[in-house]
Image: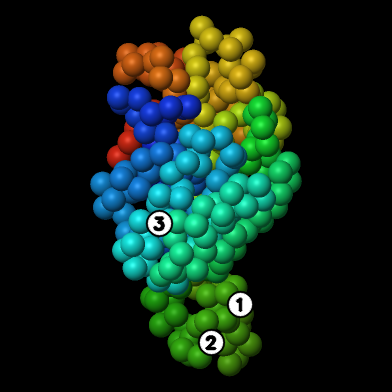
Amino acid sequence: MSNFTVNILGCSSATQSARHSQSAQVVDFRDKLFMIDCGEGTQGRFRKQGLKFSRLTHIFISHLHGDHFFGLPGLLSTMALHGIEGEVTVHAFAEGLDLLRGWMDFFNREPSFRIRYAPVTPGATETVYEDGGLTVTAFPLYHRIPCSGYIFREKPSARPLRGDMLEFHKVPVAMRRAIKEGADFIKPDGTVIPNSALTRPAPAPRSYAYCSDTMFDPRVAEAVKGVGTVYHEATYGDDLAAMARERGHSTAREAAVTAREAGASGLILGHYSKRYDAEGEQRLLSEARLVFPDTFLSDEGMVFKVGS
């Protein structure tokens, strides 16, 4: 099965800490790199994890708080200094794109690649990227300012052919593409060989949802329903549930409720408040696992495989 992974570059909230960098991830889908959020220090983490600038073609920004955005001008400038060619598309709210355009026009006057600015509509559910194998959908989250999450969905693949059965039924090579796409095979004597006898079931499409800064809201679970792997902010623990609501964030337990209600197969926590040390993060994990056992903590340098 082709690769579909999530690289964690940063999982701190608000500010960098001695332990964590600000929010940033890279989805690696079939060797194409898609960045989600770009806090300060992202470019250093990107290089430390052995990722290649030349494979990064799309960047998705969830909202316009600095811990999710301030690393972007530096990242793009460094890419220009390295002579990266082609095109990079930045998906963000219009106000952020206007700011970024001004910064890049001033500080990067001889770019080696083209930056395409693609507005994301606040509060909307919309497809913001699509190719032959993948779609990316933005959907609303519920923070103090407009914020969007992103769902990466693998498109269904064709059923693999069974070579032994193709040979047994003497299926001509010219017909095998049609069979791969779902056709039955009709023999010269009129016998119909069903497609299911000539192919194997295709693997279930995989999917990943990035739920950035958001307070707990049942609409988030509804938006990501059926997604395999979910990343959800877990800024606070049960002890600070009131503060989470006040500041537009979620607790680890609330993240787990969202994953459970969405029917996810796995949950990744992140965006921890700097008040939690390693022991405190383990408490966040324990609180979430009481609700959703298949929960994991993110940390810089970790790579998660996306499930269906």
Can you give x and y, in whole percent of width and height, for residue 287 in the image?
47, 15
Residues at circles 2 and 1 in contact by the CB criterion of under 8 Å: yes
* Residue positioned 30% across, 24% down in the render: 18
Amino acid tagged 1 = Ala
Of the image marks 3 and 2, the number of the one nearer the N terminus: 3
SS for dot 1: loop
The numbered mark, 1 or 3, whose residue comes first in the sequence reads: 3
Is residue 190 left or right of 104 when viewed as pictured?
A: right
Near-viewer residue (186 or 155): 155
**Quick one: 291 or 80, which is closer to the camera?**
80
Q: Which of marks 2 and 1 is nearer the N terminus?
A: 2
* Badge number at residue 191: none
Query: How many numbered marks, from 0 up?
Result: 3
| Residue 152 in the image: above or below residue 286 | below
State the SS at label 2.
helix
Where residue 79 appears, x then y in whole percent?
37, 60
Residue 291 in percent (x, y) is at 52, 19
Q: Which residue is drawn at 58% across and 92% down?
A: 188
Instruction: Let me know if residue 261 appears in the view.
Output: no
Mark 1 neighbour density, 10 Å: few (under 14) some (14–19) many (20 or more): some
Query: Which residue does the numbered mark 2 point to in the structure image?
Result: 175
Q: Name the residue under label 3.
A: 77
Given the image, on which type of amino acid does mark 3 rest?
Answer: Ser
Q: At label 2, which amino acid type do we have? A: Met
Examine the rendered structure and indicate whether residue 162 appears above or below residue 227: below
Q: Which residue is drawn at 70% across and 52% down?
A: 126
Scheme by which the image is coloured = rainbow
The Cα–Cα distance between marks 1 and 3, rounded to whole angstroms, is 50 Å
* Residue 183 tag number: 1
Please state if 6 lies on the left or on the right of 101 as rendered.
left
